[in-house]
Amino acid sequence: MYAHTLIGQLVVALSLTAAVPTDGLAQSDIVSRYRNAADRIIAAAVADSSAYERLAELGDRFGHRFSGSESLERAIDWMLERMKEDGLDNVRGEPVMVPRWIRGRESAELVEPRPLALPMLGLGRSIGTPPGGITAEVLVVASFAELSERAEEARGKIVLFNAPFTSYGATVRYRSRGADAASSAGAVAALIRSVTPYSQQTPHTGAMGYGDSVPRIPIAAITVEHAEMLHRMQRRGERVVVRLTMEARDEDDVESRNVVAELRGTELPDEYVVMGGHIDSWDVGQGMMDDAGGVVAAWEAIRLLKALGLRPRRTIRAVGWTNEENGLRGGTGYRDAHVDELDRTVLAIESDGGVFKPAGFGFSGSDAAFAIAQEVGRLLDGIGAGRINRGGGGADIDPIMREGVPGMGLDVDESRLFWYHHTDADTIDKLDPHDVALCVATMAVMAYVVADLPEALPRAGR
Amino acid sequence: MYAHTLIGQLVVALSLTAAVPTDGLAQSDIVSRYRNAADRIIAAAVADSSAYERLAELGDRFGHRFSGSESLERAIDWMLERMKEDGLDNVRGEPVMVPRWIRGRESAELVEPRPLALPMLGLGRSIGTPPGGITAEVLVVASFAELSERAEEARGKIVLFNAPFTSYGATVRYRSRGADAASSAGAVAALIRSVTPYSQQTPHTGAMGYGDSVPRIPIAAITVEHAEMLHRMQRRGERVVVRLTMEARDEDDVESRNVVAELRGTELPDEYVVMGGHIDSWDVGQGMMDDAGGVVAAWEAIRLLKALGLRPRRTIRAVGWTNEENGLRGGTGYRDAHVDELDRTVLAIESDGGVFKPAGFGFSGSDAAFAIAQEVGRLLDGIGAGRINRGGGGADIDPIMREGVPGMGLDVDESRLFWYHHTDADTIDKLDPHDVALCVATMAVMAYVVADLPEALPRAGR
C-alpha cells in the first residue's frame, strides 16, 4: 500500500509534465526495495550456463520442432518432465489443436541457361506443384511495383521477387503476399529472394498466406545469391527457366500442447505474471533463437527464483506456446483456456527475438504501468538491460494483450537474428552462454518485481 | 639510366642503415615520374565496374571450374575469346596436364542418437568409401594432441577433429593431415570441422594428402554447427554413430590450359612482368574470390593500360593458371614452359586472396627491389593500397619464385575470405564492384611501373 501510494503520486507527476524530476520517492522505493533481490537474481543467473546447456540439450536431442511433428511432442514431454524434476508448481501440457503442414520433398533447378540445383525452402502453408513439378520461364522483378508495370510479361511464368532486404517488416511482404501478387498477373508459381540481409547460400522459410480472389500457386524461397544471379541473367537478355517441384500439402489438425509451469505466489496466487516464448519452430535448424530461447529463459527464471527462495506475492507462470510459426494456435488457445484469469493477469512477457544480449523491454500498456516498468528497468541498468521503450509484446501474447493484459517483449541485440531466422543455421552455437544467462536474469527480475509489487500494474482507464 | 643511378644510390643508403632518410631523390623520382600515369590508371579503373561485370559473367555462365571439368575448359575458351576481342597480344592457352578427382555422390548421416542429414563436402583427393558407406561410432577430439592421448579409443571408429578456427594456417592442418592422423590410430574414416571462423551450416572443401605409412581412409568436412553438436553429444555420454558415403575417386590426368595474354613492351618486349591468379576453382560455388578475381583483375589491368595508351618498356603478361587447387600443375607447368624466360622475368604478381578492398602487396625479393616496390606503393597510397610488406607471393608463382623471380602477392581485406573459401557461398555478390576496380588499379599501377622502370628490379646477389 505504501509503495502504491507513492507510485500513484509519481505517475500523476509524470503525466503532468515530462520535466518533473523522475527521482522521486516512489522510484527510489521500487529500486531500494528490490535492489537486493535483483542483484541476487542477476548474480545467480550469470554464475553458471545452465540455461544455455538446457537449450543446447533441447536442440541437440530433438532438433527442430514443427507443429504436427513427433519431435515437437517429444520435446514437450522432455520439458514437462524436467520442469517436474525442478519441483515447479502445476506443471502441465494444455492441449491445443494445431495445423499440420507437410513440406514433403521439394527442389528447384535452373534449367536454362545452364543446369544448376538451387537450394530452396518452400514457404509454410504453400500448396505443392503437380508431381512432375512446374517448369517455366522466370520473370524477375525487384518489387510489387515492378510486377505491376510488367504484369503482361508474367503470364504463364514463374515470378521471382528479388527484393533486397531493408527491414524485416518491409521485406517479409514478398513472403506473405508474393504468391497472390504473382497469381494476379497470371503466373504459375512464385519464388522469393530469402528474407535476410546476409546469406551463405542459405534459404529461409516462413509463413505465407493465400487470399480468395486469385488461384493458389506454389511459392518457395531461393537464396540471395541465386536470386541475384537469375536477375543478372535476365538483365543480360538470357532466357531463364526453372523447374520447381514441391510435395507441400495440408493435413488434418493434430493435438499439441502449451507447456505451463508455475512459481505459485504467496499472497495472491490467483494473480499472474505470464512469461515465455514459443516451443515450436520451423522445420529447419534447431529453432534455438526462434524460439525455444524464450521458453527456456522463462523456465530457468522461475527455477532460479525458487532456488533463491524468492517467491513473489503473485504467481509467475512460464509458458511455452505451441504453433506460433504457422497458426498462432498456442496463443489463441491460451487466451481461450484462461479467459477467466485475464483480469488477474497483471503482465505478459514474451521473448521471441532470440536470447542474444538483452537490452531491455518494449512495453504496451498504460502510462502509469509504463512508468513502473521503467523503474523496474533501473534494476537492470547494471547489466545493460534496463531500457524500457514504448511499444512491444509478442505474437503469442498478442491475443491476451488484446483483452487488456499489459504486454512486454524482451529487446535484444538483433543484429544477426535475420541471418539465421527460419534457416538450418538457427542453432545453439550462434548464442553466447553469458548473453543467455543475462536474458534469464532480465526476465526473472522484471517478472519477480512486477509479481511482487503491492498493487497490480495499473491498466488504462482504471 | 638516370633513375637507375639514383635508385642505386638509394639502395646503398638503405642497406647501410635503416635510419638514413628514405625521401631521397630516387624515390621522388619514381613517384614524380609515374604519378600522372598512376592517377590516370586509377581514375580509369574506378570509372566503371567492368572488371566486376566480367567476373560476374564468368561465374554466372560457367559456375565453378574444377580441374578436369568441362566448365573449366569452356570458361577458358570464353576468356581467350574475349581477350582476343580486346585486342591483347599473344593470347593463347598453354597446355598443361592436370589431375582429375571426381567427387561423385556423397553424404554423411547421423545415425545415433537421432537420424539427421549432415551437410558435408568430401576433401579433395580423398578416396571414397565402399558402396554401402562406412557406418561407425564417432570419436570427437579437439586436436591432434587429444587424438594421441585417446588413440586407443579411435580403433574402428570415425575420428572427428572438432578443432576451432584460429588462423587458416594453423587450422588447415586438420584438413591436410587429418586422414593420416586418424588412420594411424586405427580409425576407419575421418571427419573435420570445416576450416572457417564462421558458418551458416556451410561445409568447406579443400585439398588433403596421404602419406605412405598408414592405410588411406576417406575424409570429409562437416559444418561447424554439427561438429560442435557431435562434440556436445559425446560430452553428454551419448553414443554417436555416423554413416559416411563417398564415391570419390581419381581418374586419369586430362589436358587443361594456362590462359595467357600480353601487353607487349615497347623497348624490352622479351622481359616480363607476370601477373595473374588461378582460373580453376573447387567444385563448389562460383569460385569468384578463389580465385577468378586475380585472373580477371590482371586481364582488366592490361586491357586498361592498352586503352590508356600506357604501354611500358617491358611486356606485362596476364596469366590465369590452371589447377591451383588440387595439383599446382598450372604453376609448375608455367615454370617448365617458360624456363628460358625466368632470368628475364622481372616480377611475378599473384592475387589469390579475393578481390576485396586492396591494402597493398607482400613482397619477396632483394632489399633493393623491396625499396623500389615501396616507392611504387606511394603511388597507391591515395587509394589506401600502398602498403608493401616483407614476404608474399602465391601458390602459382611459387615455382618461378624458387627460380629467383621476385614475387608479390596482392594484400586485401581478408576479414571475410574464410567465411566463403571453398564453399558454395564463394559467389560474386560477396564482392564490391568498387573494391574490384581498386584491385585492378593496384595491380595495373604496380605492374606498369615495374615493367617501365629503366632497369629491371634488382635480384639478390646480383
Image (cartoon, coloured by chain):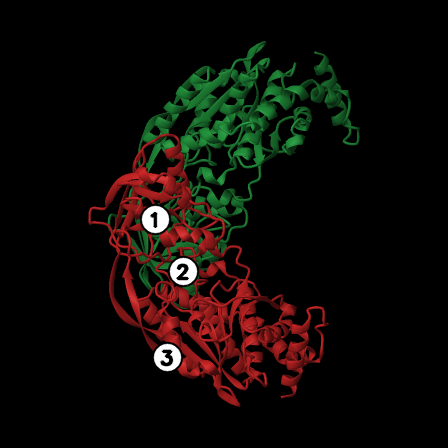
Chain colours: A red, B green
Of marks 3 and 1, which one's residue comes earlier in the chain? 1
Proximity of marks 3 and 1: CB atoms separated by less than 8 Å: no
The residue type indicated by label 2 comes to: Leu
Q: Chain of mark 2?
A: B
Quickly name the residue at label 1. Answer: A181
Q: Position of residue B157 (x, y in %)?
A: 35, 57
Q: Share a chain, discs 3 and 1?
A: yes
Is the residue B204 above or below the residue B302 in the image?
below
Q: Is residue A80 shown to the viewer in this render?
A: yes
Q: Secondary structure at mark 3?
A: helix
Q: Secondary structure at mark 1?
A: helix
Q: Is B355 positioned to the left or the right of A228 in the image?
A: right
Calculate the distance from the C-alpha at mark 3 to the C-alpha at mark 1: 37 Å
Q: Amino acid at mark 1?
A: Ala
**Residue under circle 2?**
B230
Q: Crowding at label 2, few (<14), some or many (≥20) Cα neighbours within 10 Å? A: many
Snapshot quadrant of residue A397? bottom left
Along the viewing direction, whichever of A315 and A45 lies nearer the viewer: A315
Q: Amino acid at mark 3?
A: Ala
Residue positioned most to the left: A131
Does the rendering let one see residue B162?
no
**Subunit of label 3:** A
> Quarter of the image holding residue A93?
bottom left
* Quadrant of the frame with the C terminus of chain A: bottom right
Quick one: SS at disc 2? helix
Residues at discs 3 and 2 both on one chain:
no
Q: Position of residue B60 (x, y in %)?
A: 39, 34
The residue lying toward the viewer, choosing from A168 and A418, is: A168
Mark 3 to mark 2 CA distance (whole Å): 40 Å
Quadrant (top left/top right/bottom left/bottom right) for the N terminus of chain A: bottom right
Q: Which residue is mark 3?
A: A337
Residue at 32%, 46% in the rendered image: A182
